[in-house]
Each structure stands twice: as structure tokens, then as C-alpha cells.
Image: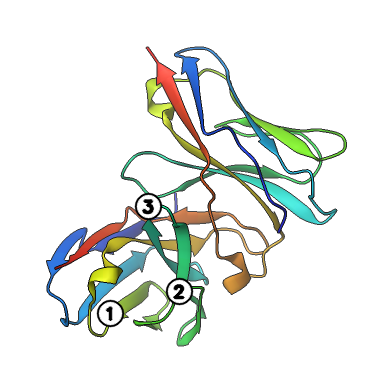
């Protein structure tokens, strides 16, 4: 699996867009970029994933650079409830087996300021 | 939302005691997973299941066993709890086959004294 690099922490003002970067310069052609987050004392939560095209859902947008070596997760209007640790994971498509076990790195601790 | 409940949510037990944690899902998902999360180690896979009575080991399976007699229930057993098994345990299901989209339960905080 490709290694990912994320800043350890970021601040964002409430109501503004939060842009979380992730570097994955060794990503392979068949590896997807996944984002999860974990709010304090809760289970991890899936946010979004993509291969090479930009993706958007009700929670966030994912922008992947053309060379796929980096990506940005965008929370368009951050709220206090978005304060969490955000994890960027690069993995091939799942088979449903143990290979789909998720391993989180240290992630980015995003703090939304009132 | 994939409904997952975990029980108990908190447990304190003594070294050498057997402990069983339960994960219950209501979405009929085929794949289920048990993880533990510790400071400095992140999230690590203990065991997973790919169907009723079909289970396999993950990264940190020593000291743990699992069973899945029904689609909706995945049990994690610590045969003889040790202090090193003090952790937060999360259950998860695979929401979409062929992806890494997993839905996690609320977790069980286990303390072994």
C-alpha cells in the first residue's frame, strides 16, 4: 500500500471551507484514495473515496491531482461537529477479506474554531 | 446507515477472566471485522468474517477467538484476558463489496486489571 503523509494538525474557522491535504506520491494505478474521520470517543466514519476523478457527496469533496500524487479533502462549510482526526488511506479495491482491514496512520487533527 | 451495536460498551475485568464482546448488525452485511485501537498503534485488525461460520485471522489475532453463527452477530472472545488487551474494540461491516467502505460501531472500552 502506498504511504500517505498528512499534516498532524490544522485549524479552521467555523463556516469556512476546511481543506485537508494528503500526499501519496507512491500511489499505484489501481489504488484508491479513501478518507475516514474519527470524532473523539466514536468509531471511525467513512467520508469519501476516489480513483482519479474528483468526487463529491453530502459530506465532502475529494480533489485528486492529475498525477494522483496528492489529494485534498474539502469540507465546504465546517461546523464545530467536524472537529475530528481525519485519515487519508490509499488502498486497492477490496476483496472483502482480511486485506480490507483498515490501518490508520496518525491522520490530521482538524480543530474547528468558533 | 448500517446499524451496528456493540455490547457491552464499557467493561472492567480481571486478568485471567474470559470476556466476550458482541457485535450486532441489522443490514445483513456479509463481511464483519473486529479491530482494536490503542494510542501509538492506531487501528489494527484482529479477526474478520466473510460469512456465517467463516472467519479468519487479522494482524493481531493472538489471544482472541471469534464466532459467527448468524449473519447479524459477530462475537469476539478473550479466552483469558491480559492487561495488554486493555483497549478500545471496534466492530465494523463492509458496506459495499469491492470497496474499502466500512461502517464502524460505537466501540467497547475494555479495561483488564
Mark 3 and mark 2 in contact? Answer it, CB < 8 Å.
no
Position of B60 with respect to A95 (left or right) is left
Q: CA distance from mark 3 to mark 2?
A: 15 Å
**Pointer 1 and pointer 3 on the same chain:** yes
Q: Earlier in the sequence, mark 3 or mark 2?
A: 3
In this orientation, does residue B27 appear? no
Q: CA distance from mark 1 to mark 3?
A: 20 Å
Q: CA distance from mark 1 to mark 2?
A: 13 Å
Quarter holding the C terminus of chain A is: top left
- Given this view, does label 3 or label 2 mark the residue nearer the observer? 3
Residue at 65 percent of width and 41 percent of height: A5
State the image quarter where residue B109 is shown. bottom left
Residue at 42 percent of width and 55 percent of height: B104
Circle 1 residues within 10 Å: few <14, some 14–19, many ≥20: some
Chain bearing mark 1 = B
**SS under mark 2:** loop
Q: Where residue B31 sits: x, y (%)?
A: 52, 71
Residue B78's tag is 1
Residue A80's tag is none
Quarter holding the N terminus of chain A is: bottom right
Chain bearing mark 2 = B
- Judged from this view, the residue extending furthest toward the bottom is B53
Position of A63 with respect to B1 (left or right) is right
Residue at 44 percent of width and 57 percent of height: B41
Q: Earlier in the sequence, mark 1 or mark 3?
A: 3
Amino acid at each position: 500500500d502506498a504511504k500517505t503523509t498528512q499534516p498532524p494538525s490544522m485549524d479552521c474557522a467555523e463556516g469556512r471551507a476546511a481543506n485537508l491535504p494528503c500526499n501519496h506520491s507512491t500511489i499505484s494505478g489501481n489504488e484508491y484514495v479513501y478518507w475516514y474521520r474519527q470524532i473523539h470517543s466514536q468509531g471511525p466514519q467513512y467520508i469519501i473515496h476516489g480513483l482519479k476523478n474528483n468526487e463529491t457527496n453530502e459530506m465532502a469533496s475529494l480533489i485528486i491531482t492529475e498525477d494522483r500524487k496528492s489529494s485534498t479533502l474539502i469540507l465546504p462549510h465546517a461546523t464545530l461537529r467536524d472537529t475530528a482526526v481525519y485519515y487519508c488511506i490509499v488502498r486497492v479495491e477490496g476483496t472483502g477479506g482480511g486485506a480490507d482491514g483498515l490501518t490508520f496512520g496518525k491522520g490530521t487533527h482538524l480543530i474547528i474554531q468558533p | 446507515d448500517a446499524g451496528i451495536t456493540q455490547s457491552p460498551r464499557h467493561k472492567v475485568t480481571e486478568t485471567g477472566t474470559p470476556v466476550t464482546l458482541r457485535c450486532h448488525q441489522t443490514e445483513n452485511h456479509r463481511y464483519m471485522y473486529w479491530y482494536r485501537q490503542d494510542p501509538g498503534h492506531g487501528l489494527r485488525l484482529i479477526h474478520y468474517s466473510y460469512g456465517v461460520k467463516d472467519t479468519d485471522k487479522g494482524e493481531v489475532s493472538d489471544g482472541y477467538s471469534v464466532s459467527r453463527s448468524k449473519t447479524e452477530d459477530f462475537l469476539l472472545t478473550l479466552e483469558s484476558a491480559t492487561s495488554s488487551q486493555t483497549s478500545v474494540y471496534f466492530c465494523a461491516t463492509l458496506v459495499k463489496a469491492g470497496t474499502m467502505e466500512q461502517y464502524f460501531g460505537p466501540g467497547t472500552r475494555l479495561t483488564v486489571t
